[in-house]
Structures are given as structure tokens and as C-alpha cells.
Image (spheres, grey):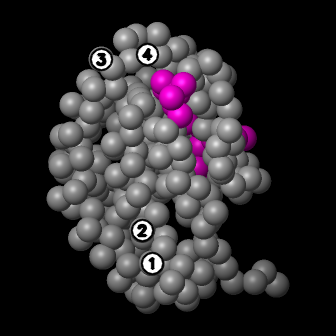
Amino acid sequence: MYSVPPSIEVAADGPLRIITLNRPENLNATNHELHQGIADIWPQIDADPEARVVVLTGAGRAFSAGGDYTYLDELTKDAALRKQTLVDGRNIVTRMVRSRVPIVAAVNGPAVGLGCSLVALSDVAFMAESAHLADPHVLIGLVAADGGPITWPLLTSLMLAKEYALTGDRIPAKRAAEIGLVNHVVPDGEVMDQALACARRIAALPQQAVEDTRRVINLHLERAVLATLDFALGAEEKSFDSPELRANLDRVLKPKD
């Protein structure tokens, strides 16, 4: 039905399209294949005349654990790959914001880094009680180009956006709902069922009214994104050469004795 890599699964449920990040053995951490696949799927969704709502989730125990450290290491050494990754990152943000169809996130486990961004770029988010959000770019020496600093200021207060972006602290599910970063916190075993129920309710409503109302609301987000995204991506590209990132990657990837 869709041209996607093995790290992404797409299933049809009537007018719903269920997108599953599918690297469960790596907690759905992002490698190049998955990152590019996320960027490329949104035009396919928009071109599917039967698609009315997307439900976005992760396979296994996590929604997404963020960037795979091996992938980050590759990006420090391969300029062409880094350039393509930044293009894909821009496309993920702009294509999700401009997507024709509403996106319901079923946050079944930790949503970190890009995973956290995908939640923030969704329209409605259901989060498992045991899950958490985090944007730890700064902790490892990177600028967060497509994450919290771009979207959070429209979802929560500027002060809270700065606190969590600058510290990389975890945001437990209950706290995330309290400050407006997700809509609903539900028991772990009910996340997908409740997300699907919400998606079906939206899919049953008049299509043009739903899609254009989403567009009206997301014009606010798009303007904020376009005002900051190019600077953010340029800053992130430079930060891949930072000594702090190199030291952190060497520490994490150091062969075990």
C-alpha cells in the first residue's frame, strides 16, 4: 500500500492509517532508514484518498527512544549523510504540520528526541501512564532543531519550554498532560484502544470540515516553525562538530572490555 522501509509499518483500518515505528529491539531509536521513512510517508498519506486519520505509535515497549547513537556517530563523520538527514528533518516537521489528515499519537512508552517531536507535531496525543517525554539534545551536545524548542512554546508556557529544552529533563506522563504537551494520560494497556476510538470519531465527521479546521489551527504552528526552523537546523549541523558531542559518543560507543 505504501513505500516504506521495514522500520515502519502501515496498516489500514477502514479510513484510518496506523503507522508503527518498528525497531522494537532498539526501542524504535532513529537510524537513517527510519528517519528518512518518517519524512517520506506524509506525502503518501496525503495522496491516499481513503485516508482520513493517522494513528502514530511505536512497536514494543517504546514510542521512540530518540536518535540511535551509532547513527549520530555516522552523522559526525559523513557530511553528505548529515546534509540529507537535515533535509529529512525539515521535511518531517513541515510535512506533519501541513498534512492533510489529522494525526493521533498513541504514546505507548518513552518518547525521546525525535519521538518527543513526533508527539508535539501530532494533533491529539494519548500517553501511557508509565511513559515519559524528553528532549535530551542539549545533554549530549546537540542543538534541538526539530524538537521541543520549535513546537513547545505554542503548546505550553515559554518558561516551561525553556526549562525542559535546556535541561533535557524527563517529563512524566501526568506532568506532560498538566502542562499541555499531551491530551490524555491513560492506563498502559488502553493507549492504543483510546487513540483508535478518538481517530474513528474524527474520521466519521465531515471530511472537508475536519481537514480545513486542522489547517486553520496549524497555520499558527507553521508560521512559528518557519520562523525558527532554518536557524535551528543550521545550528544543529554545527553542533555535530562539537567536542562535547564527540566525547559523549566516544563514551557511549566505547567497546566493552
Question: For the residue marked with disc 2, what is the amino acid?
Answer: Val
Task: Tell which circle, 3 or 1, labels the residue nearer the N-terminal end.
Answer: 1
Task: Tell which circle, 2 or 4, labels the residue nearer the N-terminal end.
Answer: 2
Tell me if label 1 and label 2 are in contact, CB under 8 Å: yes
Residue 90: give x, y in percent of width and height.
38, 61
Q: What's the magenta region?
A: 48-65
Reply yes or no: does residue 60 show up in magenta: yes
On the image, numbered disc 4 is attached to which residue?
202
Q: How far apart are the two marked residues, 2 and 4, measured between alpha carbons?
A: 31 Å
On the image, numbered disc 2 is attached to which residue?
87
Q: Is residue 202 visible?
A: yes
Residue 119: give x, y in percent of width and height.
44, 41
From this viewpoint, which residue is outermost toward the right?
257
Above or below, 129 relative to 201: below
In the rendered image, which quarter is residue 55 located in?
A: top right
Q: How far apart are the two marked residues, 3 and 2, measured between alpha carbons?
A: 32 Å
